[in-house]
Image (cartoon, grey):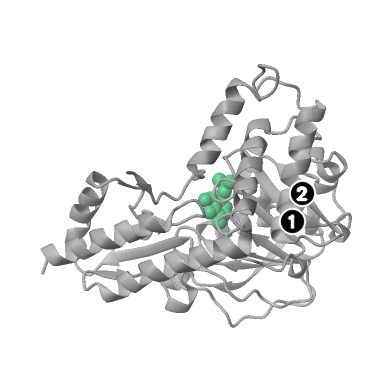
Amino acid sequence: MRHNFGAGPCILPQEVYKQAAQAVLDFKDGLSILEISHRTPQFEAVVEEATELIKELMNVPAGYSVLFLQGGASMQFAMVPMNLLSTKGFAAYSDTGVWANKAIKEAKMLGKVEVVSSSKSENYNFVPKDFVIPNDADYYHFTSNNTIYGTEVFNFPKTNVPLVCDMSSDILSRTVDVSQFDLIYAGAQKNIGPAGLTVAIVKDEILGKVDRVIPSMMDYKVHIDGKSMYNTPPVFSIYVAMFNLRWLKAKGGVAEIEKDNILKANALYREIDRNKLFKGTCAVEDRSRMNVCFVMEDSSLEKEFLRLADNAGFEGLAGHRSVGGFRASMYNALSINSVHALIELMQDFEEKNK
Ligand code: PLP
């Protein structure tokens, strides 16, 4: 059995892959999902169901639009300031890693940015907490889960400026109160569906306030008016996402999967803390449930552990090059059995290296 601890893209339940494979061959009357028109009532029903499922699973309040976009979270890094950063104002950002930095870089191309907190000096191994968000900022942007470093924000900042969050790597893994946010976006390829799809949840009333011309494809309002079909949408990615959202609903929804995610994360962190060979890389209170980063006390053993893991069917355990060691990504589709198997492997390795 393979255990996929990879950081993505797109780790979904086997049954979803099976349904997707079938739809490539025959979605309707022998036609593939890839060849039917996206303007058919059948495909419009898919977009509608996927949109409604996100609303239901995340308990999205009235006054918000759920959008299916393209360009990944990286395009949102530019689309957010284009829609929300006025030419005379400024935006506040927290710098918690590579992705936050990329968001800051794009915003700086469009206006003024104030970086209100940063954990750069500690190689992003914690989430900064004591900082002030200026009341006159056009918005405040942060990353809820720092995929590369394995830190996650558990207490969202309270502010009276619009709150914007990159939730790419922990969306749908835990309950969040959407009404606290003005704009949430996520590249789909962790817990939503295949790469090529980006989800944005926008509070309608924050739009239309900036004094710049926004190209149509970058304008949230255009996509709201077009019901996510302003241009040809990523039909296959939306279709697969719909299956995955159905799967999540059948599992009992986000609150239920959150319980599983807590069990998985607690089990692995417990072993990292107990096992004499391994140690976690992040501040304990900020440890991500989605991306568990750890190293070995004796780094010369790391290659050997990775080789053993690879031979035993564990995928994607190597840490990101900027952190080293290991990263066990544990998205919704990863079963707790895989986590127990990894723990066993760590225990065997400890036994052999006594
Ligand atoms: N933000 C976060 C937190 C991510 O983890 C990633 C990719 O892993 C991105 C942004 C970039 O996403 P995309 O590749 O969809 O542009």
Residue 325 visible (yes or no): no
Residue 179 % position (x, y): 77, 67
Number of residues whose C-alpha sits closer than 10 Å to that of mark 2, classed few (under 14), some (14–19) or many (20 or more): some
Answer left or right for 273 relative to 285: left
Residue at the image position 52 percent from the left and 55 percent from the top: 332
Q: Amino acid at mark 2?
A: Glu
**Residue 113 x %, y %:** 68, 64
Residue 132 image position (x, y, % from top left) = 67, 80
Whether residues under marks 2 and 1 lie with C-beta atoms below 8 angstroms apart, the answer is: yes
SS at badge 2: helix
- The quarter of the picture where the C terminus appears is bottom left
Residue 229 placement: quadrant? top right
Say which residue appears at 64% left-offset and 53% top-offset.
249
What residue is pinned by disc 2? 52
- Residue plotted at (75% across, 54% down): 55
Question: Disc 2 and disc 1: Cα gap in Å?
Answer: 6 Å
Please tell me which residue lies in front, 218 or 223: 223
Mark 1 highlights which residue? 56
Split into 4 quadrants, where in the image is the N terminus? top left
Amino acid found under the numbered disc labelled 1: Glu
Q: Secondary structure at mark 1?
A: helix
